[in-house]
Amino acid sequence: MPTKPHATGKTGTARPRAATPARGGLPRGYGAMRDVPLALDPRIDLTKPIYEQAAALRKAAASKRPGKPR
């Protein structure tokens, strides 16, 4: 492995902390949300820009609500 000079003038092995795999090769955080169901709105098409679709749905829902407009 290549060595990298330190500020002290010594050389050491350049190995980033994240390069070490945790738990036998699995990335950090793997399986963290395994028990949480992912709720997707069936009206949103994942092949199209999601933000524009969500904004349109939010705008349509706001216009249906009675009361003071925002």
Image (cartoon, grey):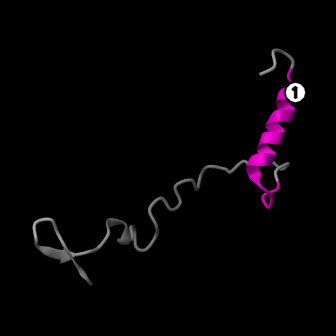
Residue sitting at x 43%, y 74%: 25
Residue situated furthest bottom in the rendering: 1
Give neighbour class at mark 1: few <14, some 14-19, many 20+ (Cα, 10 Å): few
Q: Nearer the viewer, residue 25 or 8?
A: 8
Give me the residue at 83% from left, 41% from top.
Answer: 56
Residue 26: give x, y in percent of width and height: 46, 70
**The residue stretch that appears in magenta:** 45-65
Of residues 48 and 31, the one nearer the viewer is 48
Please say if 43 is above or below 47: above
Give coordinates of residue 14: x percent, y percent: 26, 74
Q: Residue furthest right?
A: 64
Label 1, on which residue?
63
Verify whether residue 14 appears in magenta. Answer: no
Q: Residue furthest top?
A: 67
Which element carries disc 1, helix, strand or loop? helix
Q: Could you tell me how many numbered marks the image carries?
A: 1
When the figure is inspected, residue 32 is found, relative to residue 1, above or below; the finding is above
User: Which residue is located at x 52 percent, y 55 percent?
Assistant: 32
Q: Amino acid at mark 1?
A: Ser
Question: Dividing the image into 4 quarters, which one contains the N terminus?
Answer: bottom left
Taking the image as shown, residue 65 lies to the left or right of residue 18, namely: right
Horizontal arrangement in the rendering, residue 66 relative to residue 31 (left or right)? right
Is residue 57 rendered magenta in the image?
yes
Residue in view at x 46 percent, y 67 percent: 27
